[in-house]
Amino acid sequence: MGNMLKVDGLNVFYGNIHAIKGISFEVNEGEIVTLIGANGAGKSTTLNTVGGLLKAKSGSIEFEGREISGTPAHRVVSEGMALCPEGRRVFAQLTVRENLEMGAYTRNKAEAAETIERVFEQFPRLKERSRQTAGTLSGGEQQMLAMGRALMSKPKLMMLDEPSMGLAPILVQQIFDIIEALNKEGTTILLVEQNAQMALSIADRAYVLETGKIVNTGTGKDLLNDDSVRKAYLGG
Amino acid sequence: MLTYLINGISLGSVYAIIALGYTMVYGIAKMLNFAHGDVIMVGGYAAYCAMAYLGWPPAAAVVFSIAVCTMLGIVIERLAYKPLREATSLAVLITAIGVSYFLQNAALLIWSSNPKIFPNIFASMPPLKIGDAQISAVTIVTICANIIIMIALTLFTGKTKMGKAMRAVSEDKGAATLMGINVNFTISMTFAIGSGLAAIAGVLLCTAYPNLVPTTGAMPGIKAFVAAVFGGIGSIPGAMIGGILLGVIEIVARALVPAVPSDIFVFAVLIIVLLIKPDGLLGRKISEKV
């Protein structure tokens, strides 16, 4: 198992604010890796930088051995990674089917049609609602749509930013089941979560972020039992 | 009365074609391109030059005019608006007004303020007679062009990959980027289409009102903006309905109360719409779910 994603010495600024302070981490093929941490620790910033939405000041981002840190954001998806952004950000005025079609924007029509059927198998609810506009979906359905849309590019690495945010506990469980299922089918997962308990329970490995630095790392299981992690993120 | 109505629909159709350009650019790039009216003027001059100096047939002149305006639209977006993508909308608005004055004064330098008399490119087509009313060829062509353009744009934004990408960009540029959509290219294409439409509007406008001067596009541009707001800015059918209604209001008002300049009624419409229904006739409120 080689490194699929290797981030080394990454520094990101918002204006004068040093948001990410030289972090390094890696994701191996087939793993579920999670970044946990409090609000403002830099989890989303890290994902958005890997996904190309933000520019790093310095440091390298290697995907399958290729340097991608200078790649324009809209080309990153063709490299084989997809980012399912925080807050879902589905296109509210487009139909469910159109949202999925946008997810396959870089691929041809035949490939898209094939993948859309697979996504409908994974998310039968989306098939029922395929002609509705995305704005009319419930929060859980929108999260499924955002994930389905990211899957439309057939990513090798799927990055998920706070997929459980604002969802009822039963839906959170469902979303995490789906993430595990995707992983079993061969998609490598990089997950950012505030729900550390859930994230650590499905993760192979995890990194703990605090104010832009990685302060702890280990397997999901180790960190679930780690005293400092329990105190800070798991409620004691 | 029928004549007034038809003339109103004809003028309104020109407004509608211009308003479609406004609405496309506003809907997707979220900016008011106040230079849009002046692109119409450039379109008129381009067609005029092709016919008067190069001796081209009208059809070729129209194609030439569309090509010139499409390029102009892309260049304006690239040079003036793209650097301001992250700036406040007020900065973009003021830049658009600057571009507008630039185009008018550039035209003044090149073609002077003496009006050019635009040839009637539909001279060979006979007018249509319905009872007492006579409908000129340019009226018929304008109305048909308007309907064709609206249907084409609706199909384009609804059915094609590029059109859907434009709608995605209009909602969320960041999310669209994550899909692999090149946002800058998509916005360029929007300007290209809007400016191409401006060329068509320019030729039709100059055929109906043949005095071509550097400020030819300014007033119709502003009125088309009123039409776009009236119909609900961002909405394609709204631009068409707003344009036609505004044209009819203007012509009928001119006939009924000739003592009062008809522009007063046009701008009164804007004020009333903004007071009563700011999102326009077909404007929709966007509800967001968190």
Image (tube, rainbow, N blue to C red):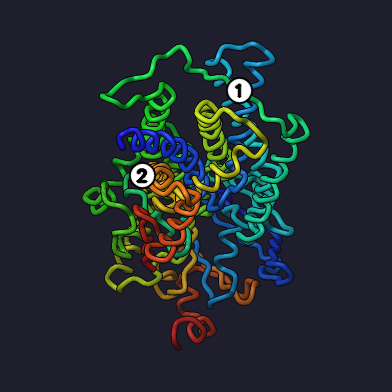
Residue closer to the observer: B126 or B218: B126
Mark identifier at residue B47: 1
Q: Where is the N terminus of chain B found, in terms of image quarters?
A: top left
- The image shows residue B133 at horizontal and vertical percentages of 32, 27
- Helix, strand or loop at disc 2? helix
Q: Residue furthest right?
A: B109
Q: Is residue B5 visible?
A: yes
Q: Where is the C terminus of chain B found, in terms of image quarters?
A: bottom left
- The image shows residue A53 at horizontal and vertical percentages of 59, 55
Please state which amino acid type lies under the numbered disc 2: Ile
Residue closer to the observer: A143 or B280: B280
* Chain letter of disc 1 in the image: B
The answer to which image quadrant residue B187 occupies is: top right
- The image shows residue A52 at horizontal and vertical percentages of 60, 52
Dot 2 corresponds to which residue?
B241
* Chain letter of disc 2 in the image: B
Please state which amino acid type lies under the numbered disc 1: Ala
Determine the residue positioned at 46% across, 61% down: B271
Determine the residue positioned at 44% across, 36% down: B11
